[in-house]
Image: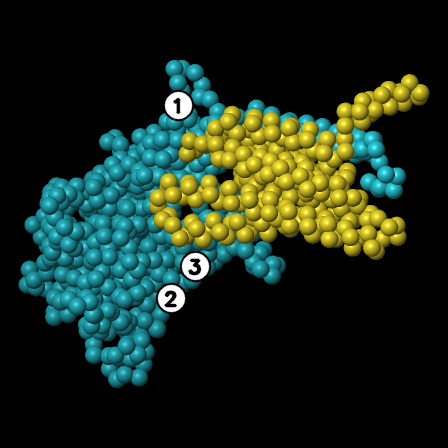
Chain colours: A yellow, B cyan
């Protein structure tokens, strides 16, 4: 669909992720390492789940569309579960690493807190998941045409970009909440995160009924944003402090 | 667009419009009833024999317009690609895409997304032959990896002689007087490599082949006084490439004979649409002003007319010679000659050099219950008519070469052979070739096309090969040489590579699929048909043909839907907005992070 759509969709899908990376991760090399490792863990989970789906698909009848659709749904659900398992594995790895980091640092404590690691790991998951979803679509959008000659919706590119944006943010928030839940041994938190992930992925199967998939996913995103804010130490008091301090700065200057 | 709209007026309108980016024409099997010829109305007018110095009143078709239906489309310069599409499933997809998305509904303009088509047809050459050959020469001189931009059209003429001549000695042959029987091998149309040329070319090829087959046994048994050449000229549609080259070679002693050896020439023009009416014998009035030439031509006409009981006529004495290879001979020497045609003045062919000049146009129809093998052998009216002409040609050539009258009746063309050739050259060559072709023939199941094309590695065009090997099989003798001897007969006693050419033929395929190959010795040769202008590197020559074909990248097309520009701009706008907002918000939040994300009760040594 030409360069305009390419840049538009790229900015929509990766704009916030890019901003987050630039302002919060790029300056600290330790955060960059945790970010990349998190992305790698997500890639591993995807590799494993796609291997399972691929074998199942090859073993089944390629002609039968019902079976293929069923396999696809199974594949999606299985992948979600594997991703969450790998998130947990990464949490365990980071906890171990944290002790090591604390040992080698000048101060007695680790240079990075578990909350920050949670955020960085979640962002790593999110960006790589978004990249995997969106890059092929972006490269196709560079051509002169758009989707639709076989009857599909012409809004495919925009909705894919919006979905990718949501998924990226969701992974970030889930990372924060998940690690917090593991820290405090609140297992119901983990269960809720997994269920929400399953819900969001299941909603994406409703496409091309975009009204059915996008608004609920964004609702979940907003919900998760609020939860992650409170889970990572924010509070309404802090928010009010933010605005009053600004006002006081304005008054004093 | 559908084929009915492919007319000159439409195409000129599109050429002048700035809003047309390309044209795709859906071919139809039959042409418009009023005729369609994209060639000019006066074919090859600048390279024929009539100029201001020779017959000025006949030059530029002042006297007779040969192709009145010609609209000159093939000679227009279009700045956009023009594709031709077969009317099959893929074309139906294109039509459906148009109907689904681009048609006007109730008088209002169609809504986005709209169906669009992209044509890829990159050509390396620009402007004209002089420019692109100059650039190619520059590349060859100065570049490490030279890139050719265009290639001259070239292929090979096929010729054979009744009495073999020493091919390695070029130039004038003592005591040789030769009668040449000629036909053309090529055609063209508006589109590249589409040239069915049934009336224009195939009829004359088939007739000459049948005449050769009829004449050879008698000529071997009772040799005529003079030698006889059967020649097939390639590239005649493009300003007489083959015949101008042969005449040039004859003039410069690079051919096995020269012009002094040529006694007379009989050319077979377009004869497929005779339909039982008379055949016309055209001659050149300007050369006939000379009494000797006139006497020879009159004698020739008499011998032709008396060969067979066929209705023959001469057009008016002041009428010019139609466009034919004979004109190139006349440019150099007033050789007595005739051109046989089915038209008196302008062509009866309504589809001259167009894609509609097919077997269907010649009314070659078969009863529907025949299999392809049976179709090859079914004797159509067209084939019978051509057989008569072939007999006429064979007998008149024999008579003109000084053969005795008592043998004339033994010379008869075989209707079965003509039928086989006619179907083969028009419709499916593969079947015909299993009976008498060389092992290197490629499998082609579509009708052969007669556009001359290029010779990139000195390969020979398949149709030329067919003609060569068919002629060799018909007029040659089977020898007992094995394959290696056949390819190099130098050391075999009694065989001479100078006089003959040897071909290893696979022979007919037997019942269980095996072939029994053998070596055929014949005097069929190929001579290069590349315009002398390229030998002389005179790329802007006005004497010789300077046609070239541009090099091109893969030619393809695709269809897709195009979104409205508003939607695209909106996507970009939303994207930029999202990016800016997220940058601002993230900066803001990260700068206030300590304030936002601190818990109210904190152990003092916890770092964030």
The residue wearing badge 3 is B456
Q: Are marks 1 and 3 on the same chain?
A: yes
Q: Nearer the viewer, mark 1 or mark 3?
A: 1
3 or 2: tag closer to the N-terminus = 2
Give the residue drawn at x 46%, y 40%. Answer: A73
Of the residues tagged 2 and 1, which is closer to the observer? 1
Mark closer to the observer (3, 2): 3
Query: Residue B253's mark?
Result: 2
Q: What chain does badge 1 belong to?
A: B
**Which residue position holds label 1?**
B103
What's the residue at 57%, 41% (across, down)?
A: A133
Residue drawn where x is 26% and y is 32% of the image:
B32
In the image, residue A80 sits, relative to residue B263, either above or below, namely above
Q: Alpha carbon of mark 3 to alpha carbon of mark 2: how far?
A: 27 Å
Secondary structure under the numbered disc 2 in the rendered image: loop
Nearer to me, A82 or B97: A82
Q: Is residue A97 visible?
A: yes
Q: How many marks?
A: 3
Give the position of the N terminus of chain B as an image quadrant: top left
Horizontal side of B519 relative to A47 (left or right) equals left
Numbered disc 1: secondary structure: loop
């Amino acid at each position: 669909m030409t360069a305009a759509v390419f840049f538009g969709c790229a900015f929509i899908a990766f704009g916030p992720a890019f901003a987050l990376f630039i302002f919060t991760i790029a300056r600290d090399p330790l955060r960059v390492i945790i970010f990349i490792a998190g992305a790698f863990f997500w890639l591993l989970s995807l590799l494993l789940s796609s291997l399972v789906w691929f074998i199942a698909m090859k073993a089944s009848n390629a002609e039968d569309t019902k079976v293929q659709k069923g396999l696809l749904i199974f594949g999606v659900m299985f992948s979600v579960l594997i991703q969450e398992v790998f998130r947990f594995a990464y949490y365990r790895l980071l906890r171990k690493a944290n002790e090591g980091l604390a040992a080698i640092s000048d101060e007695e404590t680790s240079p990075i807190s578990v909350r920050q690691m949670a955020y960085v790991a979640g962002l790593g998951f999110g960006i790589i998941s978004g990249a995997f979803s969106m890059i092929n679509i972006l490269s196709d959008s560079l051509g002169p045409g758009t989707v639709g000659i076989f009857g599909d919706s012409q809004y495919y590119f925009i909705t894919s970009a919006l979905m990718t944006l949501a998924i990226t943010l969701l992974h970030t928030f889930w990372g924060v909440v998940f690690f917090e839940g593991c820290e405090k041994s609140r297992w119901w938190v983990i269960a809720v995160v997994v269920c929400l992930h399953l819900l969001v992925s299941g909603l994406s199967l409703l496409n091309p009924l975009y009204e059915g998939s996008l608004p609920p996913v964004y609702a979940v995103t907003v919900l998760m944003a609020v939860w992650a804010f409170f889970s990572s130490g924010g509070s309404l008091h802090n928010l009010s402090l933010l605005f009053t301090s600004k006002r006081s700065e304005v008054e004093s200057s | 667009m559908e084929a009915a709209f492919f007319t000159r007026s439409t195409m000129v309108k599109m050429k002048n419009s700035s809003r047309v980016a390309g044209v795709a024409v859906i071919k139809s099997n039959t042409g418009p009833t009023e005729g369609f010829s994209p060639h000019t109305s006066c074919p090859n007018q600048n390279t024929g024999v009539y100029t201001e110095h020779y017959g000025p009143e006949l030059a530029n078709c002042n006297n007779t317009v040969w192709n009145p239906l010609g609209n000159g489309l093939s000679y227009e310069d279009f700045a956009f690609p023009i594709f031709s599409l077969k009317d099959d499933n893929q074309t139906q997809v294109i039509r459906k895409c148009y109907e689904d998305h681009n048609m006007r509904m109730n008088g209002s303009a169609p809504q986005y997304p709209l169906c669009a088509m992209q044509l890829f047809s990159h050509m390396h050459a620009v402007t004209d032959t002089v420019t692109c050959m100059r650039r190619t020469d520059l590349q060859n001189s100065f570049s490490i990896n030279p890139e050719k931009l265009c290639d001259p059209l070239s292929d090979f003429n096929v010729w054979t002689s009744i009495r073999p001549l020493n091919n390695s000695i070029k130039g004038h042959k003592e005591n040789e007087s030769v009668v040449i029987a000629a036909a053309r091998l090529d055609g063209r149309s508006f589109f590249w490599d589409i040239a069915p040329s049934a009336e224009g070319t195939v009829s004359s090829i088939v007739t000459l082949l049948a005449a050769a087959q009829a004449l050879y046994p008698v000529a071997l048994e009772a040799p005529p006084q003079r030698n006889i050449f059967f020649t097939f000229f390639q590239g005649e549609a493009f300003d007489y490439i083959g015949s101008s080259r042969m005449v040039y070679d004859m003039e410069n002693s690079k051919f096995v004979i020269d012009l002094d050896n040529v006694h007379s020439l009989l050319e077979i023009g377009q004869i497929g649409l005779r339909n039982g009416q008379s055949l016309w014998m055209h001659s050149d009035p300007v050369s006939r002003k000379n009494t000797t030439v006139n006497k020879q031509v009159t004698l020739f006409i008499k011998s032709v007319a008396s060969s067979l009981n066929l209705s023959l006529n001469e057009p008016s004495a002041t009428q010019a010679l139609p466009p034919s290879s004979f004109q190139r001979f006349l440019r150099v020497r007033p050789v007595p000659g005739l051109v046989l045609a089915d038209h008196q003045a302008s062509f009866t062919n309504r589809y001259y050099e167009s894609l509609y000049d097919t077997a269907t146009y010649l009314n070659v129809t078969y009863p529907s219950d025949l299999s392809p093998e049976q179709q090859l052998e079914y004797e159509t009216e067209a084939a019978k008519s051509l057989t008569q002409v072939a007999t006429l040609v064979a007998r008149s050539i024999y008579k003109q070469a000084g053969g005795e009258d008592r043998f004339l009746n033994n010379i008869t063309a075989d209707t079965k052979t003509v039928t086989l050739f006619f179907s083969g050259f028009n419709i499916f060559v593969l079947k015909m070739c299993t009976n008498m072709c060389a092992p290197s023939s490629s499998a082609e199941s579509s009708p052969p096309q007669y556009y001359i094309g290029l010779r990139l590695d000195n390969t020979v065009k398949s149709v030329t090969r067919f003609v060569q090997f068919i002629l060799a099989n018909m007029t040659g003798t089977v020898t007992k040489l094995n394959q290696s001897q056949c390819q190099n007969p130098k050391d075999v006693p009694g065989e001479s590579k100078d006089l003959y050419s040897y071909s290893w033929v696979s022979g007919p395929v037997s019942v269980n699929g095996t072939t029994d190959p053998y070596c055929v010795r014949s005097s069929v040769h190929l001579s290069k048909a590349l315009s002398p202008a390229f030998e002389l590197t005179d790329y802007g020559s006005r004497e010789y043909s300077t046609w070239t074909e541009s090099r091109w990248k893969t030619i393809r097309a695709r269809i897709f839907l195009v979104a409205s520009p508003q939607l695209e701009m909106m996507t970009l706008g939303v994207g930029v907005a999202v990016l800016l907002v997220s940058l601002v918000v993230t900066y803001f939040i990260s700068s206030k992070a300590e304030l936002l994300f601190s818990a109210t009760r904190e152990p003092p040594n916890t770092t964030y």
